[in-house]
């Protein structure tokens, strides 16, 4: 599309203009009045408080199909806290392989090498929009990877590449994948996510799932480093089983807990995991149809077999844009997304600061496909306005 072609101002606006990749938009029809049953003013370790926490655990297990012998806990620090808890508590017994193709995978590799100071670490890297060769992983080693690269728009295609006979633990950051993509639980030993992602919950709380094999490692392995209190799942050689029974390590927000329950109830009401995944795929289909007919944009992940349906990342491929230096590209993108925000049609859709300049549109299950349809013409219209300012 030439920037000189006049694009008519769209008539329709998304009803819900929230396409941020985290915190993500609330479920359709959400109202703060839906949280009136929150156990506010109660201790989180009281019967009322712990029952609410346990309800989140039980509903999550039921919707996601998590095996009964896997333990589920609510932990502090969002998905970041959950991942760090796993890394600090479990790594060091074996060599570690890390798959990194976007900002969070790179972050875990840095922490493992420079903070935990694990000596035997191999990092398999790939550029944004691609993934490493998954078969390079040694099944005798522990593995750390993200299921869905939130900042790159790339997901692993499936879990077929993970051996059921692995000796090491598989630790998976799945915060942009759970409730939106099929997760093969028996192939994974630790899985983490946060409430602020697929179901649009509030931030600061993380979820962590341990397989029996991971629990055995927790109980038997003593790391050669001090474990911060917020990451500590073992005290005096004994597993803190209360974390998996609705007794959090620190004080959670019971208002956020109620919000998580509300989102889980909504997920159940629309048909559970299958319905959530269908809504997500429908959003990706809308964007795919638009990209096919739009000359100035492409998916950052060009291989549709690994393209994310939640964090949908787009690159601008207009030749004049490619010729700009990084500073000018950043200015263009800032102006572009400001136009969209000023029109109240899309908020917070600029790509992650560590990723190539472009757009990142959240397509998770709380986003209505009708809103995604109404957003697409505005992306063209705002692009023309930005072109007039920066391309002449």
Image: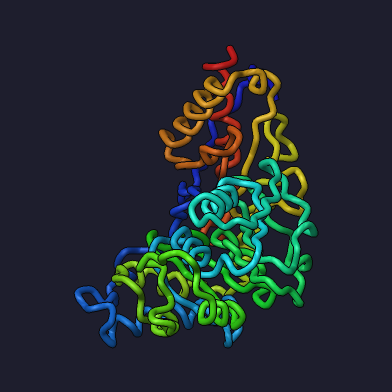
Examine the rendered structure and indicate whether residue 326 appears above or below residue 95: above
Residue at the location (77% across, 71% down)? 163
Q: Is residue 159 left or right of residue 59?
A: right
| Up/down of 232 relative to 311, above or below | below
Q: Where is residue 355 in the image (x, y as percent from the top left)?
A: 58, 38
Where is 328 relative to 282, above or below?
above
**Can residue 289 be seen in the rendering of this structure?**
no
Task: Kindly give the residue lying farthest to the top in the view shown.
Answer: 392
Q: In this view, does 190 lie above or below 366?
A: below
- Quick one: 348 or 82, which is closer to the camera? 82
- In the rendered image, residue 181, in percent from the top left (x then y), is placed at 64, 65
The reply, left or right, for residue 143 in relation to residue 27 is: right
The quadrant of the image that shows the C terminus is top right
Structure colour scheme: rainbow
Q: Return the residue found at the far left.
A: 41
What quarter of the picture does the N terminus occupy?
top right
Left or right of residue 276: residue 83: left
Residue plotted at (32% across, 70% down): 252
Q: State the residue in front, 84 or 386.
A: 84
Figure disc tally: 0
Q: Is residue 52 visible?
A: yes
| Image quadrant in which you'd find residue 189 | bottom right
Along the line of sight, the residue nearer the viewer: 72 or 264? 72
> x and y percent of residue 388 in the render?
55, 17
User: Which residue is at 61% across, 21% downward?
Assistant: 6
Q: Which residue is drawn at 71% across and 74% down?
A: 167
Tell me where residue 349 appears, x and y as whole percent.
Answer: 51, 41
């Amino acid at each position: 599309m030439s920037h000189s072609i006049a694009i008519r101002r769209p008539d329709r606006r998304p009803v819900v203009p929230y396409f941020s990749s985290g915190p993500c938009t609330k479920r359709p029809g959400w109202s703060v009045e839906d949280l009136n049953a929150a156990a506010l003013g109660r201790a989180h370790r009281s019967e009322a408080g712990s029952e609410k926490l346990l309800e989140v655990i039980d509903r999550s297990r039921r919707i996601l199909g998590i095996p009964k012998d896997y333990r589920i806990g609510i932990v502090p620090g969002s998905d970041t806290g959950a991942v760090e808890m796993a890394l600090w508590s479990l790594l060091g017994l074996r060599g570690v392989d890390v798959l990194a193709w976007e900002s969070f995978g790179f972050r875990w590799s840095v922490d493992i090498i420079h903070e935990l100071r694990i000596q035997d670490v191999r990092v398999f890297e790939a550029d944004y929009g691609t993934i490493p060769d998954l078969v390079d992983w040694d099944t005798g080693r522990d593995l750390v990877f993200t299921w869905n690269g939130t900042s790159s728009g790339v997901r692993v295609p499936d879990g077929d590449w993970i051996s059921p006979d692995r000796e090491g633990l598989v630790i998976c950051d799945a915060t942009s994948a759970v409730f939106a993509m099929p997760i093969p639980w028996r192939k994974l030993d630790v899985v983490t996510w946060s409430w602020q992602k697929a179901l649009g919950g509030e931030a600061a709380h993380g979820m962590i799932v341990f397989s029996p094999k991971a629990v055995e490692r927790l109980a038997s392995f003593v790391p050669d480093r001090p474990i911060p209190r917020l990451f500590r799942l073992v005290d005096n050689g004994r597993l803190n089983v209360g974390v998996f029974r609705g007794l959090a390590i620190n004080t959670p927000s019971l208002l956020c807990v109620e919000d998580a329950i509300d989102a889980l109830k909504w997920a159940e009401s629309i048909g559970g995991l299958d319905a959530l995944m269908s809504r997500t795929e429908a959003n990706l289909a809308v964007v795919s149809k638009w990209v096919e007919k739009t000359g100035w944009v492409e998916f950052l992940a060009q291989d549709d077999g690994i393209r994310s349906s939640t964090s949908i990342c787009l690159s601008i491929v207009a030749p004049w844009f490619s010729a700009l230096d990084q500073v000018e590209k950043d200015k263009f993108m800032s102006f572009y997304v400001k136009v969209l925000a000023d029109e109240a049609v899309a908020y917070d859709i600029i790509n992650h600061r560590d990723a190539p300049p472009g757009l990142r549109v959240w397509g998770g299950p709380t986003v209505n496909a009708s809103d995604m349809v109404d957003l697409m013409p505005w992306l063209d219209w705002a692009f023309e306005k930005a072109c007039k300012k920066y391309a002449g």
